[in-house]
Amino acid sequence: IDLRQPEGQQVFYRLVEKADVVVTNLHPATLREFRVDRETLLAIKPDLIYAHATGFGPHGPHAEDPCQDTVGMARSGFMFNTPTADGAPTYPMGALSDILSGTMLGFGILAALLARERSGVAQAVWSSQLSAMMWLQYYNVAQYANMGADFAPFDRTTVANPLMNLYRCADGQWIACGMAVAQRFWPDFCTVMGLSSLEHDPRFAKDKQRAANRAELIAILDKAFATQPRAHWERLFREKEFWISVVNQVSDLPTDPQVIANQYLVKLESGLTTVAFPFALEKTPVPLTHGAPNFSQHTDEILQRVGGYTPEEILALKEKNVAW
């Protein structure tokens, strides 16, 4: 629908009358230009949930600044989570800010629909790349806000708890240890690693001592892990129910047994493979079978089924380039 044309706006209003939710990520000035801003649409349908994905939130001096993934990630501080060796920010690939802010908007929409069902109150919903990426860094941001201290960049040679660390094995593969309650696992860990002499070593016997002598202990563990391939350590650790995982690369995921068992990658009817929904419904599953529609693929269907337009009226709209 061409929202620059008054007739196109009227078509859109007709669809809005039947809608529960309108979702947009257009710039506020564009929404006003197209006359599809929040105030205009709520006047047409007062119980509408109006959901707006923004860069930096609906208020403040930069509320209407243009934004995309790089910009949103930069503003949130996320680029300094894993700086380079010389302290420069880095840009993690994969459109993380775009994806997370859209996901958070989806949660907001569900909350707003539930609130409307229970209380009859309709409302606008906002998410922003700034707020979403701050939420992703919840612990980091909260620590600085309350204690005035930022998390130091991760350095596996100096982690305070060596049982929460990454280790390279003999075959070059990595394994992650996540034993936060280290003392509970320390005796068995020493035995499995073939380092029983360390269990009561005064340098490493307790959490405090292991933290104080972390660099020395990590160096010892590095040498131990390097004596066997990852599968060896993974098997022994699982027998003891240690909190561990292989460290996958993205290229490992299609053959990961957990990914396969839970169908976290799905093949679409087009033959392309994509990532499944990040949740599963037991009683009412929602299979993902189709990719994004092609441009104008469903124009006729939506105008006819939702808007109530006849085929002749749709043809007339297309002839005037109001719809495609």
Image: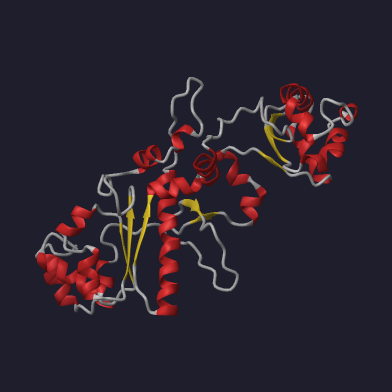
Image vertical order of residue 145 relative to residue 225, above or below? below
Q: Which quadrant is home to the N terminus?
A: bottom left
Which residue corresponds to the image point at 41% horizontal and 69% vertical from the top-left? 112
* Residue 256: percent from left, percent from top: 64, 46
> Residue 188: where, in percent of width, then height?
86, 39
Q: Quadrant of the C terminus?
A: bottom left
- Is residue 114 rendered to the left or right of residue 303? right
User: Which one is in front, 160 or 164?
Assistant: 160
87 or 224, which is in the foreground?
Answer: 87
Q: Total marks drawn?
A: 0
Task: Spot the residue most to the front.
Answer: 147
Q: Position of residue 216 (x, y in %)?
A: 75, 21
Q: For the point 14% across and 57% down, which residue is it?
A: 33
Q: Is 154 placed left or right of 176 in the picture? A: left
Q: Is residue 110 above or below residue 116?
A: above
* Quadrant in which residue 9 is drawn: bottom left
* In the displayed structure image, the side of residue 207 where residue 245 appears, left or right: left
- From this view, report whether residue 65 is shown above or below residue 231: below
Describe residue 238's horizontal placement relative to residue 75 as left or right. right
